[in-house]
Image (cartoon, grey):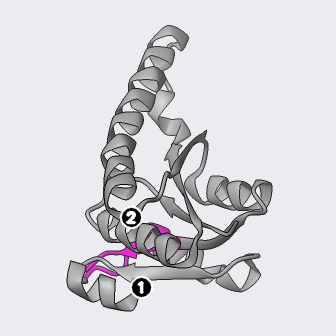
Amino acid sequence: MRKFMVVLDDSRECLNAMRFAAMRAANTQGGVTILSIIPPEDFNHWIGVGDIMREEQRERIEAHFEVFAKWMRDKQGINPELVIREGEVVAEIIAQISEDPNVGVLVLGASADRGGPGPLVSQLSRGAGSLPIPITIVPGDLSKDRLEMIT
């Protein structure tokens, strides 16, 4: 089964990327992998404090995931999987793609702000020619109706 991988973060554009991935998966009998990455700089504290912070971060990610997963199950009939990795964001995205041969498309949300599409889209699109899968970049201000028509 081909899976659409989408990155879960705190950005507003993440929402449209989630919607797009779920709708495309539902329309193509695919799956969705939701990847969340905990950057290493979040835990440069004493070992005990860092462990507590890491666990709190994981709990927050899982709660955030459940909101998207419920919508995907209820509205699209998709049961997404959650993958949490720790490390540098771009390196972990590439590692997950390499480790899961069923991931067929990386879906990213682009910021609608005038400051550019966002750091993740900028970094990954520069190296898109060497990625083993295509990237779909979903505009952050695309309406739900337009998303449904596209997918």
For residue 124, side relative to residue 69 (left or right): right
- Earlier in the chain: of badge 2 and badge 1, it is 2
* Residue type pointed to by label 2: Gln
Q: Residue at x 39, y 27 (%)?
A: 59
Q: Residue at x 70, y 77 (%)?
A: 133
- On the question of residue 23 being in view, the answer is yes
Q: Which is more toward the observer, 44 or 104?
A: 104
For residue 91, side relative to residue 66 (left or right): right
* Residue type pointed to by label 1: Thr
Element assignment for label 2: helix
Compared to residue 6, the image places residue 37 above or below, namely: above
The residue singled out by tag 2 in the image is: 76
For residue 96, side relative to residue 71 (left or right): right
The answer to which image quadrant residue 138 occupies is bottom left
The residue singled out by tag 1 in the image is: 151
Q: Which is more toward the observer, 22 or 87?
A: 22
Q: Residue at x 35, y 33 (%)?
A: 60
Q: Which is more toward the observer, 145 or 28?
A: 28
Q: Give the magenta-colored segment's residue range.
A: 107-120
Q: Which quadrant is the C terminus positioned in?
A: bottom left
Residue 86: image location, x then y, percent: 59, 39
Residue 48: image location, x then y, percent: 50, 9
Badge number at residue 89: none
The label nearer to you, 2 versus 1, is 2
Compared to residue 2, the image places residue 90 above or below, namely: above
Compared to residue 21, the image places residue 138 above or below, namely: below
Residue 137: image location, x then y, percent: 46, 81
Residue 141: image location, x then y, percent: 22, 80
Compared to residue 37, the image places residue 15 above or below, namely: below
